[in-house]
Image: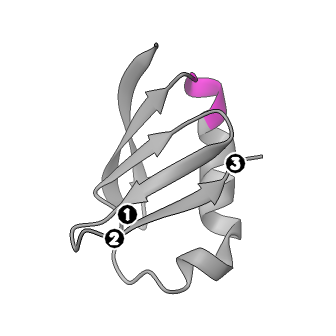
């Protein structure tokens, strides 16, 4: 399985994104989902420390141990 890591800025904080079975072409879709998924992201007060990006979803991990899944289109 392909696994590569990159960093993105989320609310001006660098966040590690692990590309799992996907490639860099899905990063714009991830950024769009992070901006548009207001239901999940409205309850989040701090940026995630890591994101696992799959071909159809992203899993966001937080320092408090919480994790959220958001769909990627």
Q: Position of residue 14 (x, y in %)?
A: 31, 52
In the image, residue 20 sits, relative to residue 63, either above or below, namely above
Nearer to us: label 3 or label 1: 3
Q: Specify whether residue 23 is painted magenta.
A: yes
Residue drawn at point x = 65 percent, y = 26 percent:
25
In the rendered structure, which disc, 2 or 3, sits on the residue that comes first in sequence?
2
Q: Is residue 23 left or right of residue 36?
A: left
Left or right of 38, for residue 58: left
Range of the magenta residues?
A: 22-26
Mark 2 residue element: loop
Residue 26 as seen in the image, left or right of residue 44: right
Which residue position is annotated with label 2?
Answer: 66
Residue at 55%, 49% (x, y): give it.
Answer: 58
Residue annotated with mark 1: 12
User: Disc 1 or 2, which lies upstream in sequence?
Assistant: 1
Q: CA distance from mark 1 to mark 2?
A: 21 Å
Kindly report the distance in space between the C-alpha atoms of the residues bearing marks 2 and 3: 19 Å
Q: Are marks 3 and 1 in contact (CB under 8 Å)?
A: no
Please, which colouring scheme is shown? Answer: one colour
Which residue in the protein does label 3 denote? Answer: 72
Q: Considering depth in this image, is 9 or 42 the residue closer to the camera? A: 42
């Amino acid at each position: 399985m392909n696994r590569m890591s990159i960093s993105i800025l989320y609310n001006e904080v660098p966040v590690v994104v692990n590309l799992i079975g996907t490639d860099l072409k899905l990063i714009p879709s991830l950024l769009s989902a992070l901006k548009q998924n207001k239901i999940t992201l409205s309850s989040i007060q701090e940026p995630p420390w890591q994101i696992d990006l799959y071909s159809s979803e992203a899993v966001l991990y937080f320092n408090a141990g919480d994790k959220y899944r958001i769909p990627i289109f």
